[in-house]
C-alpha cells in the first residue's frame, strides 16, 4: 500500500504523477475505446496495448505500467491465468469482463487483482477506478461488491456489536458515506446522491479507511453489513 512503481512521469498540468496504463483485450475496437476514454483524463496515459495474456506479460515487464486493464476472456492465455504474473511484476490489475460471474470474481481476487469492472462501466467511473487502484485501494463494480458482501460476511453471535464498535470513531458524515460505499456506489454516484463534490467524498472515504484500518472499500462494505446498518 502506498508503494510507487517505476514509470510515472510528471503531469505538465500540475506536477502530479501521471498514471501509466496498459490495456489488454483481444478486440481491437474495445482497446481503442478504452484508450480514448482514459486519455481524456490529464492524469492518465495509455502506454501500450496487448491482445492476449502472453502479450500482457511481455509488455508489463517492458513498460512497467502502474495499472493493467486485463480482459478476463481471451484466446490463448486468458486474463485470469496471467494476472498473478502481472501482479508479481509490480503492476496493479483491474479485470474487465462482460459477465460478472462469481467464478470470475473469486478467481480474479485470488489472482491478486484489486479491481473488477464490467465493460459497460460509464467512462467517468472507469477513469476513477484506475485512479483508485493506482492509489492502492480496491475498486469493484457495484453488483460485484453486493454479491461479495453476501458471500463473505458472517454475522455470528456478537458480530453486529463488534462491527458497530469498530465504526464508532466515524463522524456522522463519514458513516453516511461508508453506508453508500456498502450499497455498491462509486464516488461519483455518492457525490450525486449526497449533493457534494467527488473530491469531498474521496476525502471522507480515505479518512474512514484510515480510522478503521481497512485496506479497501470492500472491507468497509463488509463491516457495514456486519453492523446491520443498511
Image: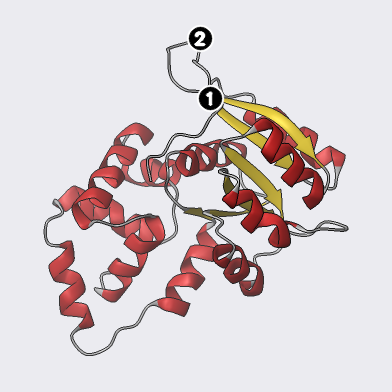
The residue under the point 55% across, 20% down is 42
**Residue annotated with mark 2:** 12
Measuring 61% from the left and 43% from the top, which residue is drawn there? 122
The quadrant of the image that shows the C terminus is bottom left
- Left or right: residue 183 versus residue 34 is left
Check whether the beta carbons of the residues at disc 1 and disc 2 lie within 8 A of each other: no
C-alpha separation, residue under disc 1 versus residue under disc 2? 12 Å
Q: In the depicted view, which residue is nearer to us: 188 or 76?
A: 76
Q: Is residue 98 above or below residue 107?
A: above
Q: Secondary structure at mark 2?
A: loop
Percent x, y for residue 64? 62, 34
> Vertical placement of 136 versus 182: above or below?
above
Question: Which residue does the numbered mark 1 point to in the structure image?
Answer: 8
Residue at position x 77%, y 35% from top?
A: 49
- How crowded pointer 2 is (Cα within 10 Å; few <14, some 14-19, many 20+) is rated as few
Residue closest to the far top: 12
Q: In the rendered view, does 52 fall on the left or right side of 153?
A: right
* Any part of residue 213 in sight: yes
Amino acid at each position: 500500500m502506498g508503494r510507487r512503481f517505476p514509470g510515472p512521469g510528471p503531469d505538465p498540468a500540475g506536477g502530479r504523477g501521471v498514471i501509466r496504463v496498459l490495456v489488454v483485450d483481444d478486440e481491437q475496437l474495445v482497446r481503442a475505446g478504452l484508450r480514448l476514454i482514459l486519455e481524456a483524463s490529464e492524469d492518465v496515459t495509455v502506454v501500450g496495448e496487448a491482445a492476449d495474456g502472453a502479450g500482457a506479460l511481455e509488455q508489463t515487464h517492458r513498460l512497467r505500467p502502474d495499472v493493467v486493464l486485463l480482459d478476463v476472456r481471451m484466446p490463448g492465455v486468458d486474463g485470469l491465468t496471467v494476472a498473478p504474473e502481472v501482479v508479481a511484476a509490480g503492476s496493479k490489475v483491474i479485470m474487465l469482463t462482460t459477465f460478472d460471474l462469481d467464478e470470475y470474481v473469486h478467481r480474479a481476487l485470488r489472482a491478486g487483482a484489486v479491481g473488477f469492472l464490467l465493460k459497460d462501466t460509464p467512462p467517468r467511473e472507469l477513469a476513477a477506478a484506475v485512479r483508485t487502484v493506482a492509489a492502492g485501494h480496491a475498486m469493484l463494480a457495484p453488483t460485484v461488491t453486493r454479491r461479495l458482501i453476501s458471500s463473505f460476511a458472517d454475522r455470528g453471535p456478537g458480530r453486529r456489536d463488534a462491527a458497530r464498535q469498530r465504526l464508532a470513531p466515524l463522524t456522522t458524515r463519514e458513516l453516511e458515506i461508508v453506508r453508500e460505499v456498502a450499497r455498491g456506489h462509486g464516488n461519483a454516484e455518492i457525490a450525486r446522491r449526497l449533493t457534494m463534490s467527488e473530491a469531498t467524498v474521496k476525502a471522507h472515504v480515505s479518512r474512514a479507511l484510515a480510522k478503521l484500518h481497512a485496506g479497501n472499500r470492500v472491507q468497509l462494505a463488509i463491516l457495514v453489513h456486519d453492523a446491520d446498518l443498511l
